[in-house]
Image: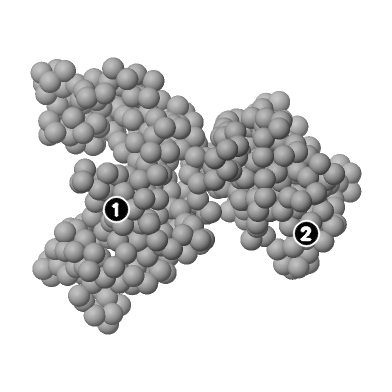
Amino acid sequence: MVGLIDCNNFFVSCERVFRPELNGRPVVVLSNNDGCMVALSNEAKALGLKRGDPLFKVADIVKRAGVVTISGNHRFYGDMSARVMATLAAIADDIEVYSIDEAFISFRNVTSDYDDLGRYIVKKVKRDTGIPVSVGFAPTKTLAKIAARFAKKYPGYKGACVIDTPEKARKALELTEIGDVWGIGRRHRRRLEEHGIMTAAQFTDLSIEQIKGMFSIVGERTWRELHGQPCIAREDMPERKTITSSRTFARDVYDWESIRQATVAFASILGRKLRGQKCFATELSVFIMTNRYHEREPQYFNTTVRRLADATDDTMAIADEAVKAMKEIFRQGLGYKKAGVTITKIVHRSGVIHSMFADPRDIERRGRLMKTLDTINENLGPSARLRVASEGGGLSDLVNGHPDKQNRENRVVTDEPKEQKIVISPRIISG
């Protein structure tokens, strides 16, 4: 089962976290130049206002109904998004951030009680971040999007909707307009409606031959997903705005050195992914949490965000900031069950302008080092990996049973390949 987490009226909800007097009032968030409405509260939507409406065209309604207008603060919304995603990363076994207010999650060992799990997530995110969310669980990402939409639309679901049987899926598809299906754009919607296809159920009633004749591979994937066949992989997702690397520890980890090495390992994974996407990071967040199942032990969860001094895909620069951030929230004496690092803001390499204080020669030298690192790792294959010296044993030592003296029994569950102890230092490549 796949879960889709959707933050409700996200920009408005962010404003309400620190301005509770806005609760229950019609609120709209405006674009950067205050020209258009980009987010609305449910109360504002009830007045007939719509996202994208120019403010001057609805000025009378805004004034008459006492609508609160707010200039958008997208840096603030990005910080709040990072908090939400860090909270989700601490709950789920895997997370794919789809947009600033949406993320797909999955669990390895959950086989039932998705209703209870969904409602737990709703309460957890609200309590930890102040942001209300809707949760949808289903066998595929496209169906999960539909489930989350039902959870948001109908209060009876209490924030969580689960589509786990063919009967539930059919009913949901019959109640979903074709234009509301993820992957059906405006042009395809018009084309389908011209053929009398008005609902998602009618779309799934078409034969695969008809689908192939009318659509590209994307349309075929949507059709198969609505039939309960998962076929949208990570690489088929749009370019992500955030990337997360996190792990759940098999046993509680108490010492800072193990957490530090794991943090560097997370940064190394993120650096490789950034370079593979030809992107740079400009901001990151870290999180750490204790074992919520150990109810008699002290419970602790924390996250923090750090902006990078310069946009980078350099593993060592990312690791340095991630370790500093993790040190801020680490509390000695607690047993930690999970930790992770998220790149919360990503920019394409072609659009980066480095700060005036950045040394071009150092950037070039570190770039060569990272390129060499990636080339060697590619040639080594999955059975071995060259890594930066500061990673130490990282995740591998924990997996293979080589923790430090204070943490001899700790292990960590990871899907990364086991690593050979080969390390690389910046000194290897001279400037």
| Residue underneath mark 1 | 161
At x 60% / y 37%, what residue is drawn? Answer: 297
The reply to whether residue 326 is visible in this rendering is: yes
Quadrant including the N terminus: bottom left
Q: Secondary structure at mark 1?
A: strand
380 with respect to 307 (left or right): right
Q: Is residue 356 left or right of residue 86?
A: right
| Residue at 18%, 29% in the rendered image | 43
Q: CA distance from mark 2 to mark 1?
A: 40 Å
- For this view, does 94 lie left or right of residue 250? left
Name which of mark 2 and mark 1 comes first in the sequence: 1
Q: Quadrant of residue 23?
A: top left
User: Tag 2, which secondary structure?
Assistant: helix
- Residue positioned 40% across, 69% down in the render: 230
Question: Which residue type does callout 2 highlight?
Answer: Asn
Q: Which circle marks residue 357 in the picture?
A: none
- The residue that mark 2 highlights is 400
Counting from the top left corner in percent of width and height, residue 21 is at 28, 17
Q: Residue furthest front?
A: 296
Asked if the residue under mark 1 is in contact with the one under mark 2, i.e. CB atoms within 8 Å, the reply is no
The scheme the figure's colours follow is one colour
Of residues 113 and 245, the one nearer the viewer is: 113
Q: Residues within 10 Å of mark 1 (few under 14, many from 20)?
A: many
Q: Nearer the viewer, residue 162 or 272?
A: 162
> In the image, what residue type sits under mark 1?
Cys
How packed mark 2 is, by other alpha carbons closer than 10 Å (few <14, some 14-19, many 20 or more), is few
Image quarter of the C terminus: top right
